[in-house]
Image (cartoon, rainbow, N blue to C red):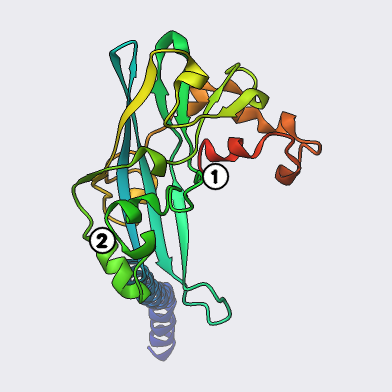
Amino acid sequence: MTRSRGVEVDCRIGLRVPQLMFAATRALACASVTVAARSMKRIALFIGIAVAAYFVYGAVFSATVRYCLTLQAEVDGEPKSGSGIIEVTYSKNNDPISQAAFSIDVRGEAVILDLGPRGTLFALLKADTDSRSGPEYIVLKAFDCPGGALPSPVINGLQQVRHLSGKRELALTSLPLLVRFRDPNDPKTVERVNPLDLERSFGAGVKLVHAELEIVPAGIWPFNSIGITGEPLTTGINLRLKWLDHLDQYRSDPSNPFSSTLPPEISGLRSN
């Protein structure tokens, strides 16, 4: 009986060993899953906090405005019009080393005014003789910000930018730099255009008669930066000026963007 019991006991132990191993393995697996789940929750929480901080930082320390710049002309009495949506973002500079109180980022393209057989007028993303006629300041000047600059302190200025609305007529002498190309296929034929004397550049009967700036929906930051919200920025200038996508062929060193041999006006055709 003792031997039988011994055998019986050994058999029971033999049968229980796999069960114990399975239970231990299952417990370890459950523990691993629990640890992994806790780690995932911590990671998700960290990402959530980081995203929330990113949103808060952007909402407090930056302001984005989008506006539609419209130009109207007459060619032998026939009205012509062109417009484009441009975006400007003003951001408070929190770098203690930097001396600049804020930074500015511009996105968009030159406004195109097609004058038919007479040619095409481009309003660049670049200031003319009026230093406040560039894309980043023309909107501030249009809405009567003192000196056409971002109001101080910067935080208050950002708040004012967020509340801009409506439209304003622009003086023709306060427009961005206007240019044309004698040959649209050759960027080196760019010429400056006097807003008060289009006839000199495009022939008799052509004149610029009106310009206005209107605030349009900027969308929700940061989704507007990828085109999900807000009035879409104007694109497509490269379809009219084919060489714009191949500026490297106009460099003394194709790999160095600072070695361009083109006139400085070309840099105002679109943002980087």
Disc 1 to disc 2, C-alpha distance: 24 Å
> Which residue is painted at 27% across and 55% down in the image?
143
Quarter of the image holding residue 69?
A: top left
Q: Residues within 10 Å of mark 1 (few under 14, many from 20)?
A: few
> Which residue is painted at 37% across and 76% down in the image?
42
- Mark 1 and mark 2 residues within 8 Å of each other at the beta carbon: no
| Element carrying mark 1 | loop
Residue 235: x %, y % from top left: 42, 32
In this rendering, would 268 be left or right of 3?
right
> Which residue is painted at 51% across and 20% down in the image?
201
Q: Residues within 10 Å of mark 2 (few under 14, many from 20)?
A: some
> Which residue is painted at 43% across and 12% down in the image?
204
Report the residue that reaches farthest toward the bottom: 2
User: Disc 1 marks which residue?
Assistant: 272
Is residue 41 in sight in this rendering?
no
Type of the residue with mark 1: Asn
Q: Nearer the viewer, residue 44 or 103?
A: 103
User: Disc 2 marks which residue?
Assistant: 162
Type of the residue with mark 2: Arg
Q: Nearer the viewer, residue 129 or 134?
A: 129
Is residue 181 in sight in this rendering?
yes
Mark toward the start of the polypeptide (1 vs 2): 2
Quarter of the image that includes the C terminus: top right
Between disc 1 and disc 2, the foreground one is: 2
Q: Is residue 190 above or below residue 128?
A: above
Residue 239: x %, y % from top left: 49, 21
Residue 162: x %, y % from top left: 25, 61
| Element carrying mark 2 | helix
Report the residue that reaches farthest toward the left: 166
